[in-house]
Amino acid sequence: MPSPLLVWLSPPLAVAATIAVSAAIFAVIGSKPAQSVFAFFVSPLLSTDGLAELALKAGPLAMIGVGLAAGFRANVWNIGAEGQLTLGAIAGGGIALAFYGQDGWWILPLMCLAGVTGGMAWAAIPAFLRTRFGVNEILVSLLLTYVASLLLTTLVFGPWKDPDGFNFPQSRMFSDAEVLPPIIEGTRLGLGTVIAFIVPVLVGVVMRYSIIGFRLRAVGLAPAAARYAGFSERRVVWLVMLAGGGLAGLAGVFEVAGPIGQLIPQITPGYGFTAIIVAYLGRLHPLGIIPAALIVALSYLGGEAAQVQTGLPKAATGVVQGMLLFFLLASDFLARYRVTPVRRPRVAAGAASTPAAAPVVS
C-alpha cells in the first residue's frame, strides 16, 4: 500500500523539483538563475497588486479545477473545460450586449445564469454521446474546445464587433450594470473571485457528507459494486459533466464581466486546460485545489514578471507548468512503486552474461 504521507507530500516535492530544474533551465538559456527564480516565484508576492492579481487568476482555476476533479473521481474525463468556459462567456456576453445601455440589478445575475447554461449545454454534448453511443468523452470534449473558440472568433469579427471599436475584433465594453464590482479599491479583484473560492468549499461539503458524493466515489473506485448497489453510471456521467461545464461557464462569465469587461477572441490563457494540473496537484480534493490554484496562478504572474525583469521568453510559463505536471506524475509513481535492486543468478560459462544486479520496479 502507498504511504498516505508520501502521497500528500508529492505535490510540495513536485513544486520543489520544478523550481530547482527551472533554475537550471534558466541558466542554460543564458539567464541568471537566482534572479530569474526570484522574479518568477517571489516578486509577484511582494505587493498588494501582485497578491490581488494572484487571487484573480487563481479563482477561475480553482472553480474549474474542482468541477473537473469531481468528474475525475468518477472516471469521467472532461478535457474540454476551456470550450465550456468559452461558451459560458459567449452566453453571458450575449445577454450583456442584448441589454446594452440598460440599467438593472437583474442583468448580472441573468448573465451568470446564461453562462452556467451555456457551459452545461456544451458539456452535454460529450455526456450524451458517451451515455448513448459509448463515444469517448475525452476526444469529444477536447475537439469541441476548438469549435467554441472559432465560434467566439466569428462573433467578435462579425455581428458582435464593436461599431465604434476602430475595426478591432472585440465587442462593446459592458456597461456598469453588467460588470462585477471590485471588492478592493485600486485592484481588479472582484466579487467573482470570492465566489470562485467559496465553490470548492461547498463542493467539498457535498462530496464528503452527501449521498451524491458517495455515489461519485463509488462509481469511480468500484463500478461493478456501484452497479450492484443500484447506482446509475449514466446519471453520474451526466451529473459530473453538467456540473463541470456549468462551473467552467460561470468562470467564463466572471472573466468577461470582470477584468476584461467585453468579449475578445481569446478570453483566458488556457485556464480550462491548466485546471487539469490544478486538479491533480490538489489531489482531486476540493480543499487541496485552492492552494494548488494559487501555486499554478503564480506561474502565470511569475512568467509575466520574469519577461519584464530578466527577459525570459513567454514560453517559460508553459515549460514551468509542464514540468510541474511531469514531476507530480513522477512523484505519484514513486509513492506507489519502489525501484529495488534484485540479484539474478549468473549464467554458465560461455553463455551470454547478464548483469549481476538490475533495477526493476516492484
Image (spheres, helix red, strand yellow):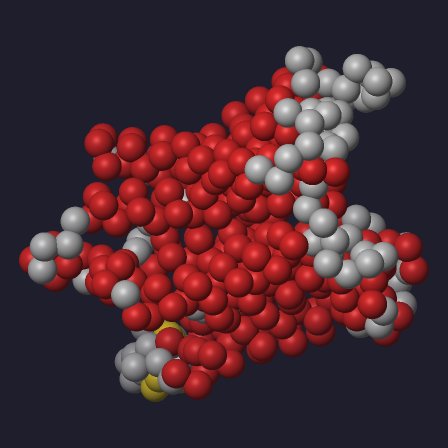
Between 323 and 272, the one lying in front of the other is: 272
**Res. 29 in view:** no
**Res. 348 in view:** yes
Q: Number of numbered discs present?
A: 0
- The spot of residue 158 in percent (x, y) is 68, 13
The image quarter containing residue 160 is top right
Q: Quadrant of the N terminus?
A: bottom left
Q: Quadrant of the C terminus?
A: bottom left
Q: Compared to 224, does 12 lie above or below?
A: below
Between 326 and 128, the one lying in front of the other is: 128
Left or right side of 336 for 172: right
Q: Compared to 196, does 259 lie above or below?
A: above
Question: For the view shown, which residue lies furthest in the front direction?
Answer: 104
The image quarter containing residue 237 is top left
- The spot of residue 320 in percent (x, y) is 68, 60
Left or right side of 326 for 340: left
Between 257 and 87, the one lying in front of the other is: 257
User: Which residue is located at x 23 percent, y 63 percent?
Assistant: 211
- The spot of residue 197 in percent (x, y) is 57, 62
User: Which residue is located at x 63 percent, y 18 percent?
Assistant: 154
- The spot of residue 114 in percent (x, y) is 50, 34
User: Which residue is located at x 76 percent, y 30 percent?
Assistant: 173
Q: Compared to 99, does 26 lie above or below?
A: below
